[in-house]
Amino acid sequence: MKNRLFKMLGLFIVIFVINTLSYAQDYTQWHLPQGATLRIGKGEINDVTFTPDGEKLAIASDIGVWIYNAHTGTEISLLKVRPRGVQTAHCITFSPDNKTLAIGNWVLGGAVELWDIEKGELISVLNEDVGSVEELVFSPDGKTLVSGSRNGTILIWNLEEMGIANR
């Protein structure tokens, strides 16, 4: 009786593994709506933006920020933003020189972070208690960053004076 039970369990596992592998082909092409060419992103998506030159695409999620090649959809990196609340990365924007990504956290104090895209490294945490960051915008010269929070607070960061602009 036990031998038969083990055989049935083994058969079930083999069928499950084969079935799972057959579905694990290319999820990026599954059931795409007409006109869509690719499915990317992981986790709950909070914001999406291109670099100013259109070469990269960033997707803010509760996992972190995924950076993709905008033309091929190839994943370049994941910026593992430190959780500071419910949403790890709520809003994002690239600097005009395509080198820096500003990330705004949401809920429980919030934060504004600057990341080096090429190195995948945190450059600076501008502030850890700015409220629920809803919007981030760089000035055209990249020397100023403006953050807007859910509580109505607008903060203007002079990145040049802080020694962060145009590194």
Image: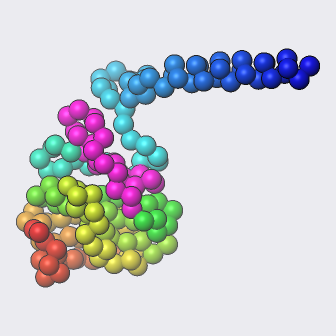
- Left or right: 26 in relation to 100: right
Q: Which residues are magenta?
A: 57-81
Q: Is residue 64 magenta?
A: yes
The extreme right residue here reads 1
Main secondary structure type of the part rendered in magenta: strand
- Left or right: 108 in relation to 17: left
Seen at 85% across and 20% down, the residue is 3
Q: Position of residue 87 (x, y in %)?
A: 46, 60
Q: Is residue 121 magenta?
A: no
Seen at 18% across and 50% down, the residue is 51
Closer to us: 104 or 101: 101
Vertical relation: 154 (above or below) 142:
below
Vertical relation: 101 (above or below) 1:
below
Q: Quadrant of the C terminus?
A: bottom left
The extreme left residue here reads 141
Q: Position of residue 44 (x, y in %)?
A: 47, 47
The extreme front residue here reads 3
Closer to us: 101 or 13: 13
Closer to us: 73 or 129: 73
Vertical relation: 78 (above or below) 141:
above
Seen at 78% across and 18% down, the residue is 7
In this view of the protein, can residue 45 be seen by the observer?
Answer: yes
- Left or right: 44 in relation to 122: right
The extreme bottom residue here reads 161
Tell me where residue 110 sits by quadrant.
Answer: bottom left
Vertical relation: 97 (above or below) 111:
above
Seen at 38% across and 29% down, the residue is 28
Q: Position of residue 9 (x, y in %)?
A: 76, 23
